[in-house]
Image (cartoon, helix red, strand yellow):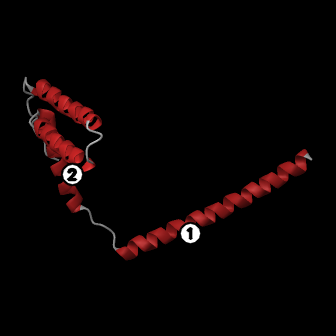
């Protein structure tokens, strides 16, 4: 595990986050205001606003740290050894079999205990 120095926060980071919040709010209000317009135009407008908000957010220290986290996660996903189709099928069948056996055991135990209680109670 590598130790990375945290990016220093700029004094303008709070202002940048305020711009992001305002852009998101403008998108929500505009989507409601232009409800009569075509959904295509509203979606394109929201995507443009989201892209601008994401760009502004990535200019902050926390945004850069989040982007670094995404890159590291992508690298780790590439290292995962995924099971083959046969292994997945076999594991699924084993799980289904164990669930069925446990269901039958619990059903039998419940029936036995119900019968015992009904004979004791009357």
| Residue 65 visible in this rendered orientation of the protein | no
Q: Which residue is drawn at 15% across and 50% down?
A: 71
Q: Quadrant of residue 110?
A: bottom right
Q: Quadrant of residue 103?
A: bottom right
- Total marks drawn? 2
Image coords of residue 46 (percent x, y): 21, 42
Q: Residue at x 79, y 57 (%)?
A: 112
> 66 or 3, which lies in front?
66
Q: What element carries label 1?
A: helix
Q: Which residue is drawn at 34% across and 73% down?
A: 84
Marking on residue 97:
1
Is residue 117 rendered to the left or right of residue 17?
right
Q: Which residue is drawn at 78% across and 53% down?
A: 113
Image coords of residue 11 (percent x, y): 7, 23
Q: Quadrant of residue 90?
A: bottom left
Q: Is mark 2 on a helix, strand or loop?
A: helix
Image coords of residue 114 (percent x, y): 80, 52
Marking on residue 45:
none
> 48 or 35, which lies in front?
35
Is residue 6 rendered to the left or right of residue 118?
left
The residue lying furthest to the bottom in this view is 86
Is 4 situated above or below 83? above
Q: How far apart are marks 2 and 1 (CA)?
A: 34 Å
Instruction: Say whether marks 2 and 1 touch (CB < 8 Å).
Output: no
Name the residue tied to disc 2: 73
> 42 or 60, which lies in front?
42
The residue lying furthest to the front in this view is 36
């Amino acid at each position: 595990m590598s130790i990375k120095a945290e990016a220093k926060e700029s004094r303008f980071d709070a202002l940048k986050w305020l711009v992001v919040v305002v852009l998101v709010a403008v998108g929500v209000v505009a989507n409601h205001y232009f409800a009569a317009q075509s959904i295509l135009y509203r979606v394109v407008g929201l995507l443009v606003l989201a892209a601008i908000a994401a760009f502004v957010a990535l200019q902050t220290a926390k945004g850069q740290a989040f982007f670094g986290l995404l890159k590291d996660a992508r690298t780790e996903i590439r290292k995962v050894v995924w099971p083959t189709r046969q292994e997945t099928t076999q594991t699924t069948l084993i799980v289904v079999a164990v669930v069925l056996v446990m269901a039958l055991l619990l059903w039998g135990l419940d029936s036995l205990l119900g019968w015992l209680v009904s004979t004791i109670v009357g």
